[in-house]
Image (cartoon, grey):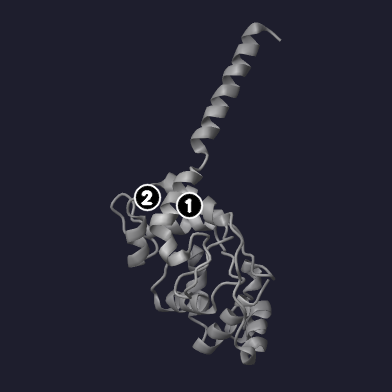
């Protein structure tokens, strides 16, 4: 190998190393942000103690970043996901901050919630595994996985999530309060479900492991 080739290779390695350093999430800064901004609602490890605030520990990093970004209005545009509290929380965050927070919370292990309504387990399980054929509602497992682990970016992990929170999101999709689902998928599904069906499948998902 010529000296010129060696020099070029060295320069490429250095440039690649610098780029990697620039792109690496600042987890120390994320930790400070969590302690001052996020912990009151989500706890320092993302395992919220209140069902109004979701458990985000162990959630997919790409999904968390997507949600944080969509809570904020960019370039004069309104937020893709409207939530007065979260929009205020992310107002001063830049994309790098959001990526770091997403990495930070995804690194923790979720402390899952139990299923509590034993009387609706069979209905919830049926909807989760098979959907509701008579209404054209697909199985939840088709997108969120048999164990509720989801798919990064598009489909969140909902196993172990507060049943009340999952139910509230389903109702929000149905009632138009939440509109950031890919291809309107959740909005179309939720429109076909009754409150009882939402409650049953939300409780079943809480008990998934």
Q: Quadrant of residue 40?
A: bottom left
Dot 1 and dot 2 residues touching (CB under 8 Å): yes
As measured in the structure, the alpha-carbon distance from the residue carrying label 1 to the one carrying label 2 is: 10 Å
Q: Is residue 136 visible?
A: no
Question: Residue 68: horizontal and vertical position, in percent?
Answer: 43, 57
Q: Which mark is residue 173?
A: none
In the rendered view, would you say 102 is above or below 162? above
Q: N-terminal of the two: label 1 or label 2?
A: 2
Q: Quadrant of residue 143?
A: bottom right
Residue at image point 48% right, 80% down: 191
Q: Which residue is mark 1?
A: 101
In the rendered image, which quarter contains the C terminus? bottom right
Q: Is residue 30 left or right of residue 209?
A: left
Q: Is residue 205 left or right of residue 178?
A: right
In the rendered view, would you say 63 is above or below 208? above
Question: Residue 104: horizontal and vertical position, in percent?
Answer: 53, 52
Q: Is residue 37 visible?
A: yes
Residue at image point 53% right, 60% down: 45
Question: Residue 53: horizontal and vertical position, in percent?
Answer: 45, 70
Q: Which residue is mark 2?
A: 93
In the rendered view, would you say 79 is above or below 203? above
């Amino acid at each position: 190998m010529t000296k010129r080739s060696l020099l070029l290779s060295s320069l490429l390695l250095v440039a690649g190393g610098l780029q990697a350093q620039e792109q690496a999430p600042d987890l120390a800064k994320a930790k400070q942000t969590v302690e001052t901004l996020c912990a009151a609602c989500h706890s320092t490890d993302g395992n919220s103690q209140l069902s109004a605030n979701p458990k985000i520990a162990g959630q997919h990093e790409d999904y968390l970043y997507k949600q944080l970004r969509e809570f904020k209005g960019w370039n004069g545009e309104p937020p893709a996901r409207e939530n007065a509290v979260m929009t205020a929380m992310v107002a001063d965050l830049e994309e790098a901050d959001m990526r770091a927070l997403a990495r930070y919370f995804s690194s923790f292990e979720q402390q899952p919630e139990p299923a509590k309504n034993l009387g609706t387990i069979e209905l919830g399980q049926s909807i989760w595994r098979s959907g509701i054929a008579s209404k054209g509602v697909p199985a939840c497992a088709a997108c969120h996985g048999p164990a509720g682990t989801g798919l990064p970016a598009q489909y969140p992990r909902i196993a172990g999530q507060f049943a009340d929170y999952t139910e509230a999101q389903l109702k929000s999709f149905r009632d138009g309060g939440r509109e950031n689902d890919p291809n309107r998928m959740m909005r179309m599904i939720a429109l076909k479900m009754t409150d009882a069906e939402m409650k049953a499948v939300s409780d079943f998902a809480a008990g998934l492991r």
